[in-house]
Image (spheres, helix red, strand yellow):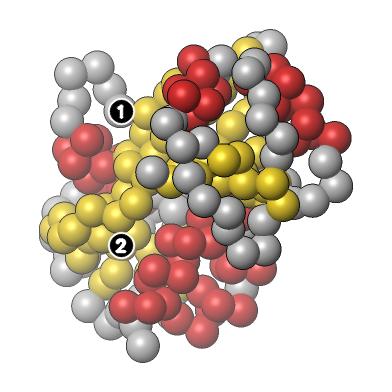
Amino acid sequence: MYYKVFISPKEIAFANTQLDGFCTAPNFTRPEDLLTFINGCEEDKIVVLDDDGKTWKAFKKHHVLIKAAGGLVKNEQGDLLVIKRLGYWDLPKGKIELGESIPIAAEREVKEECGITKGLTLLDKLPDTYHTYQHKGQNVLKQTHWFFMRYSGYDILSPQLEEGITEVCFMPKKEVENVAMKNTYKSLLPLFNAYLGRNK
């Protein structure tokens, strides 16, 4: 059992064993106390030892859970589909609609946010990511389901402006490393690294 949550700017792991490079949080029975510790801790990598998963379940219940889906999309040249939203390089994703399956939601969001009409193929599932934020006074935990996808279409890409997206492009590997990964969210770095691992 292992979950990783990004509570900006910190990386929190819920695991049943100590992790290299992570400091260990004390045992807390209340999620509020754990969050207080995390916010006050100077370390940016913290592991919460959670053998039976109860702490993780309590942590989730302390938040409003929002489920989203998105894609890590490569074209036939091996370039990565990226978007720029709120000044940061991001990957296309969005909320899963009521009654919608996770793969269909992932494909729909990529198409909507990037102006793609066809030529998109879902390949395999990637690990989910989790991050937290505040919205209208509530603690929100966002779980995003990710899929590797291949694009073989000929659309002229266009950003979904109403979602705050200002740019969309297929970015070559070197630019992903030297541009996108230097101006993105910590929670997305494992996904960018997964792309780089497949493009060796």
Question: Is residue 166 among the parts visible in the rendering?
Answer: no
Above or below, 185 relative to 86: below
Circles 1, 2 touching at the beta carbon (< 8 Å): no
Residues 122 and 197: in front is: 197
Residues 42 and 197: in front is: 42
Above or below, 175 relative to 22: below
As helix, strand or loop, the secondary structure at mark 2 comes to strand
| Coordinates of residue 46 in the picture (x, y in percent) | 67, 47
As helix, strand or loop, the secondary structure at mark 1 comes to loop
Q: Which residue is mark 2?
A: 73
Above or below, 156 relative to 26: below
Mark 1 to mark 2: distance in Å? 18 Å
Residue 124 placement: quadrant: bottom left
Residue 121 appears left or right of 30? left
Which residue is outermost to the top? 137
Residues 112 and 73: in front is: 73
- Amino acid tagged 1: Ile
**Residue at image point 36% right, 88% down:** 200
- Amino acid tagged 2: Val
Q: Residues within 10 Å of mark 2 (few under 14, many from 20)?
A: many
Question: Is residue 125 among the parts visible in the rendering?
Answer: yes
First along the sequence among labels 1 and 2: 2
Q: Which residue is mark 1?
A: 96
Residues 177 and 126: in front is: 126
**Mark identifier at residue 88:** none
